[in-house]
Amino acid sequence: MANKERTPFEKMMALGRAKEVLMISIAIAAVLIFIMILNALDAAPIPLEPIDWAMLATMGFMGPFGIYVNRKQTEIEKIERKLPFFLRDVAEAGRFGMTLADAIVVSASGRYGKLTPEIQKMAAQISWGVPASQALNNFASRIDTPLVNRVVAIIIKANDAGGNVADVLTLVSQDAKEVHLSEDEQKIAMTSYLAVIYISFAVFIVVIIILNTQFLAQMGEAGEHLEAQGGGGGGGAEIRTENIPVIGFIFTLAVFAHAIGDGIVAGVLQTGKIASGMQHSFILTVMGFFALRVLYGGLELMG
């Protein structure tokens, strides 16, 4: 019986303990937001502005969950990298006249890195009397990636049709290798785009710092000088220095927004998944928070 098609979010939540990590991330963000509210009510006076708490809450949410999802995706990628070698060994065993089930059991003694435990589970199920097609379906359900699902579907159909499964396994193994080579080429190409995103964000931070420390600071000094001269000596010149903190806040907010947006874009470029971008957003937000709120002490523009 075919499995019910799951949404990308459901597949993401099936990655090990993703639900628990997500709950922890939400709890961290909620605690930080709660402290921000208390601070706004002067119930827990901490020398941080609301934008600081917002950035910390974002880091608390995106950091643990984003890092965990990327780690699990890396593990799945390592599993997929060993799949062609397993298929090759099964094909070789099949050429000696073994059935698909026997070939899987014999090949389970090989070393396939992180794929080995899953293969051993599949071999154990076959040894207990589970049909090879069902064991393969269980194997695909546990890993649940497009490549594994496609490979397993092809193998099962070839085995049910009664054709030369060994030749099919060889072709599928070669196809999987080509998929990995294509992914490697894509990663190499995307690395340059990731570097551009990080470098452009760093440049953006430097520009914001220069604007705050030079431009806005000089505007404030000029405004104070004009006020000391009684409004510019009657010439009508006026600098509204009370708007300078607002401009500083907008600059900080712009860095915050860019960190989240650029991180999501980086993740989509790298893996095609928004969840992967959460780790990049976390890194960029940390960079922005450290540069603007820690290194320069809030630029002394937020009061």
Image (cartoon, rainbow, N blue to C red):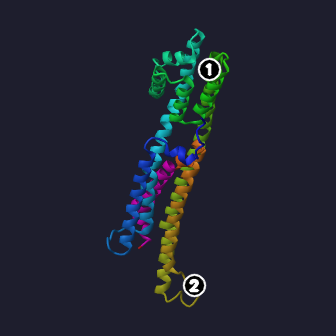
Residue topped by disc 1: 169
- Neighbor class of circle 2 (other Cα within 10 Å; few <14, some 14-19, many 20+) is few
The amino acid marked with disc number 2 is: Ala
Q: Position of residue 252 (x, y in %)?
A: 49, 65
Q: What residue lies at 54% left-to-right and 63% top-to-bottom?
A: 254
Q: Position of residue 242 (x, y in %)?
A: 49, 80
Query: In which quadrant of the rendered view does residue 44 lie?
Result: bottom left
Q: Can you name the residue that lies furthest to the left here?
A: 44
Q: What residue lies at 57% left-to-right and 18% top-to-bottom?
A: 100
Closer to the camera in the image, 91 or 55: 91
Closer to the camera in the image, 92 or 249: 92
The region drawn magenta spans 278-302
Magenta-colored segment: predominant secondary structure: helix
Closer to the camera in the image, 96 or 258: 96
Judge whether 215 appears above or below 256 on screen: below
Residue topped by disc 2: 237
Quarter of the image where the C terminus is located: bottom left
Sequence order check, earlier mark of 1 and 2: 1
Task: Tell me how many marks there are.
Answer: 2
Residue 280 inside the magenta-drawn segment? yes
Closer to the camera in the image, 5 or 114: 5
**Label 1 with label 2: CB-CB less than 8 Å:** no
| Distance between mark 1 and mark 2 Cα atoms | 81 Å
In front: mark 1 or mark 2? Answer: 1
Q: What residue lies at 51% left-to-right and 49% top-to-bottom?
A: 280
Residue 205's tag is none
The amino acid marked with disc number 1 is: Leu
Can residue 223 be seen from the camera position used here?
A: yes
Judge whether 11 appears above or below 135 on screen: below
